[in-house]
Image (cartoon, helix red, strand yellow):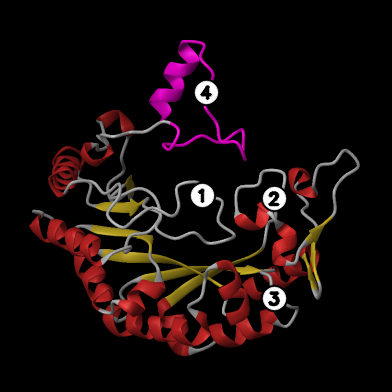
Amino acid sequence: VLLEIVQAVKSNSKVQTTSIAPAVTNDKLYPYPDFVHSGAEYESTDCIIPGESVPLEFARGCIFKCSFCSYELNGKKPGDYIKHANTLRTELIRNHEHQGIQQYIITDDLINDSEEKVDQILEISESLPFKLTYSGYVRLDLLRRFPSMAAKLKQSGLIGAFFGIETINDASGRSVGKGLGRERTTEALEICDSAWNNSVAGLSGFILGLPHDTPDTKYELIEWLSQPMIRRVLKDVLVKPLFLSPDIGMSDIDRDPAKFGYTYTKLADGRSRYLTGHPDWQLTNYSFSQARVDSEFVQQ
């Protein structure tokens, strides 16, 4: 994508951007058909420090379409945009032989979007002449649906997992495409606790201000997070208020806030407060300003 943009600029052509967000471009607009055979080559001039984690892509795009998500390449089919196994193995061995690299941050939008992908990662990892370790984004609902995934991910080298739990408010979760719910989220974390035996560092993001949240939501989250099993799996949490950006319109909520129950204050020139760094949405029983305070309270 970057090469296409540079070539367009060099030839004085207009760079394609999305209609809903004129500053954004992606590989839907600039297809990269050879992605499945591509890889990153690190050189001595990259100054890789021994033990440093470097970026690596197994695949690109996300099979889910959460209502608050602003990512343009969501909703793909399982199996799309996944690199060939031989390409990945060659890249990993080359990086290890030339730079001593064996620890990675997987930049995939989702590591475990299918059993087939997890099995492929495990097969590649076990074929390497060194111990691969990595961290990346993992979906808990898929671990609950396919419990064997948790052990396979650990066996393949997972040492750090970021979860997008986002909410334990069942009504809020259902309204934005996070329908796992509090009870089943807890069950999924129990699977991780058993399979990982405290050897994988979990981190999760949480959002306050989703459609059915209230000022009491923070207390429910604090109570849930205080459970010993939860804390064994989640070594840390990141709690933020919902950022509404109707000017940019990247997510479903951004494009139609009223549909989800939000109103927001615009500036005199018609812009919403998002562009000034101070979004100001309102729900019936909640507001951005309160959610921001509550987020800081939970995070302490």
Circle 1 residues within 10 Å: few <14, some 14–19, many ≥20: some
Q: Which residue is mark 4?
A: 15
Instruction: Using the numbered discs, state the Cα–Cα distance from disc 3 to disc 4 in whole angstroms.
Output: 40 Å
Q: Residues within 10 Å of mark 2 (few under 14, many from 20)?
A: many
In the rendered image, which residue does mark 3 sit on? 213
Which image quadrant: the C terminus?
bottom right
The image shows residue 89 at horizontal and vertical percentages of: 14, 47
Mark 3 or mark 4: which is in front?
A: 4
Marked residue nearer the N-terminal end (2 or 3): 3
Specify which label sits upstream in the sequence, 3 or 4. Answer: 4
SS under mark 4:
loop
> Residue pushed farthest top?
11
Residue 125: which quarter of the image? bottom left
User: What residue does disc 2 label?
Assistant: 245
Amino acid tagged 2: Ser
User: Magenta span covers which residues?
Assistant: 1-29
Residue at horizontal 56 percent and vertical 36 percent from the top = 18
Q: Is label 1 in contact with label 3 (beta carbons under 8 Å)?
A: no
Q: Position of residue 165 (x, y in %)?
A: 50, 71
Provide the secondary structure element on which disc 3 rests.
loop
Above or below, 289 against 105 in this view is below
* Residue that numbered label 1 is attached to: 71
